[in-house]
Image (cartoon, rainbow, N blue to C red):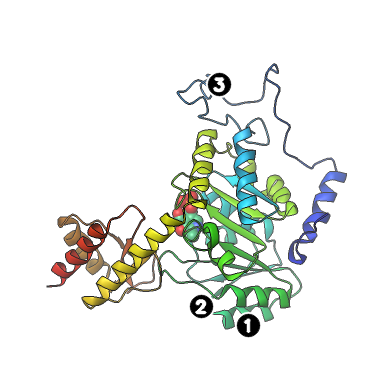
Amino acid sequence: VKQAPPALAHLAYELRVLAQEGLLRERPAPLSPEAVSFCSNDYLGLASRTCTGLAGAGASRLVAGERAEHAELERECAAWLGADAALAFSSGYAANLGTLAALAREGDLLVSDERNHASLVDGARLSRARIAVVPHVDANAVEQALAQSRGGRAWVITESYFSMDADSPDLAALRGLCDQRGAALVVDEAHALGVFGPEGRGLCAAAGVVPDVLIGTFGKAFGASGAFVAGCKELIGWLWNRARTFVYSTGMSPACATAALDGLRVARRSPHLRGSVLANAKRLRHGLHGIGVSPLGHGHIIPWVLGRAESASEMSSKLAARGVHALAIRPPSVPTGTARLRLTVSAHHTERDVDRATAAVRECLE
Ligand SMILES: Cc1ncc(COP(=O)(O)O)c(C=O)c1O
């Protein structure tokens, strides 16, 4: 039997305690078609009467919301990533909030990159662990913070591809530091999955790094909505029991699980889509460089720092007037004085679309 990684080994014990106390909750067996359910919240009986017959789970998955679509999505997601198991959440926000709050406890240390997404920040706060916010993608700072760990468990929390800066931490270095210190590595791959790595398995896979907890969303490259956490069986068992955004919330809609699985399957077997989005990114970055604009980072998110919030909004409006939509990102989403325009490319864009964006930016700068 495969064991949990060292940083999560305690979860096997915690789950045993729950079992001894008669409090362990496990995935329910599917109801037989003849059974009559008296535990759903589908009060008007509409969840299964829509055009798809799959609209609502009807209840939390622990209560009566478990559907075959959930298990299928989770099985394929785990298999794709080479993880033991996965758990679907109704959003990435819920996944991050519920996961961090369920894993870290008072007395633990959470080492968190200063640019981590709000959902990671809020999950860290809810956990009541001590939080060390470290400078962006700074492995030395992570090392120093881990050295301050006293007694409790330590958790290193990062994104693999930061959506506001389009940059990445040194995941192999973070893995090494976590191993040295017995800390767990938690990586949110929301913006990397589907685009980077073999079969779109993300930047951890590309770097040959196995995080203890991997979070991904279905609302980005997979074109659906919802999210998942992947890792060892003990992790998923613990989240099933203790992630409050999972336990106390209606299960992901089966319609959404079906859409997410379809997106995952297509993304997985479509290297040409990954090739297109990255080729478009290269073309736009190259075009912008050619007109004196130096965007941050690498890849399909292309942030152009303009400084003042007004400058970013103004540039966004000027581009919109030319039929090019690019969002102005302002504080508090980014630090004051670093408001930016964020252009994200897709496999759907043609070379003409990309060149049109470059031409529009050039006109706005004239
Ligand atoms: C890094 C990251 N994690 C999580 C989320 C939240 O995902 P969702 O939109 O599915 O709630 C986002 C943004 O939406 C994100 O950028």
At x 43%, y 58%, the residue is 274
What residue type is disc 1 on? Answer: Gln
Is residue 221 shown above or below 257?
below
Whole-percent x, y for residue 94 in the image: 55, 49
Marks 3 and 1: CB-CB under 8 Å? Answer: no
Q: Identify the image quadrant of residue 215.
A: bottom right
The secondary structure type at the circle numbered 2 is loop
- Crowding around mark 1 (Cα neighbors within 10 Å: few <14, some 14 to 19, many 20+) is few
Marks 3 and 1 sit apart, C-alpha to C-alpha, by 54 Å
At label 2, the amino acid type is: Pro
Query: Quick check: 70 left or right of 320?
Result: right
Instruction: Kindly identify the residue that appears in the image at 63 percent across and 33 percent down.
Output: 68
Dot 1 falls on a residue whose secondary structure is helix
Residue 290 appears in which quarter of the rendering? bottom left
The residue drawn where x is 22% and y is 69% is: 311
Q: Residues within 10 Å of mark 2 (few under 14, many from 20)?
A: some
Q: Is residue 299 above or below residue 254?
A: below
User: x%, y% of residue 340?
Assistant: 31, 68
Between residues 344 and 95, which one lies in front from this camera angle? 344
Q: Earlier along the polypeptide chain: callout 3 or callout 1? A: 3
> Measured along the vertical axis of the image, is residue 49 above or below residue 301?
above
Q: Could you say which disc has been placed on residue 28 in the image? A: none
* Horizontal relation, residue 282 to residue 137: left or right: left
Mark 1 or 2, nearer chain start: 2
Q: Which residue is mark 1?
A: 144
Residue holding disc 3: 43
| Residue 307 visible (yes or no) | no
Q: Where does the image place residue 362, in percent across and percent down from the top left?
A: 17, 70
Q: Could you give the CA–CA distance between mark 2 and mark 3, rounded to whole angstroms?
A: 50 Å
Inter-mark Cα distance, 1 to 2 = 11 Å
**Under tag 3, what secondary structure?**
loop
Reading the image, the residue beneath label 2 is 135
